Image (cartoon, grey):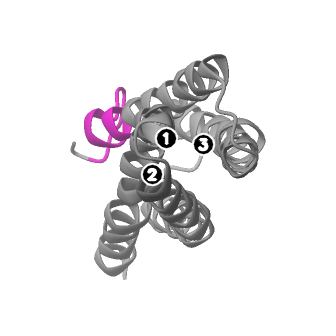
């Protein structure tokens, strides 16, 4: 059962988190292009925002199966896992409280015909923090410092 849970956890991470990190990273540069190619960029921005929102919801599966896997492996109290859970929670907060709302605000600004360069820069920074948090979680999941599970 552990192998099944781990496989679903890893596949969900690849399928759900991967698209969010890529689409979120693409959003700020596309937002800056709106002035040059307004119609094409508007559609691209809306699509990228929908991808981020949709896959963020699907991404809830990742920690659910991760916790189930950790429980089966008996590692719920391990430091590497607790840090991973904290970083995952922080990444979810950054996505839900900073990245997605700022994308929405930029989309509204685009509809109004005004794109603020500062808004795209702030969004790019929040997106970078989100991506770095996921990178740190990924490293912790692979390296598992102090683990006795045979990493």
User: Do residues under tags 1 and 2 come within 8 Å of each other at their CB atoms?
Assistant: yes
Per the image, the residue denoted by label 3 is 85
Per the image, the residue denoted by label 1 is 34
Sequence-wise first label, 1 or 2? 1
In the image, farthest residue toward the left: 151
Residue 133 covered by magenta stretch? no
Q: Nearer the viewer, mark 3 or mark 2?
A: 2
40 up-or-down from 139: above or below: below
Residue 141 % position (x, y): 35, 42
Quadrant assignment for the N terminus: bottom left
Q: In the depicted view, which residue is nearer to us: 91 or 142?
A: 91
- Residue sitting at x 29%, y 73%: 7
Per the image, the residue denoted by label 2 is 41
33 up-or-down from 149: above or below: above
Residue 144 covered by magenta stretch? yes
Q: Marks 1/2: CA distance?
A: 5 Å
143 up-or-down from 96: above or below: above
Q: In the depicted view, which residue is nearer to us: 74 or 59?
A: 59
Magenta segment boundaries in residue numbering:
138-149
Binning the other alpha carbons within 10 Å of mark 2 as few (below 14), some (14 to 19) or many (20 upward) gives many
Q: In the depicted view, which residue is nearer to us: 60 or 25?
A: 25
């Amino acid at each position: 059962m552990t192998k099944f849970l781990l496989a679903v956890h890893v596949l969900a991470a690849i399928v759900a988190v991967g698209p969010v990190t890529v689409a979120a990273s693409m959003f700020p540069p596309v937002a800056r292009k709106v002035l040059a190619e307004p119609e094409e960029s508007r559609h691209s921005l809306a699509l990228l925002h929908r991808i981020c929102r949709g896959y963020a919801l699907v991404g809830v599966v990742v920690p659910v199966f991760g916790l189930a896997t950790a429980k089966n492996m008996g590692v719920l109290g391990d430091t590497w896992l607790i840090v991973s859970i904290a970083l995952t929670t922080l990444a979810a907060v950054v996505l839900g409280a900073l990245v997605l709302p700022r994308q929405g605000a930029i989309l509204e600004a685009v509809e109004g015909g005004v794109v603020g360069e500062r808004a795209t820069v702030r969004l790019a920074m929040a997106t970078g923090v989100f991506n770095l948090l996921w990178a740190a979680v990924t490293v912790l999941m692979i390296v598992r410092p102090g683990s006795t599970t045979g990493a």
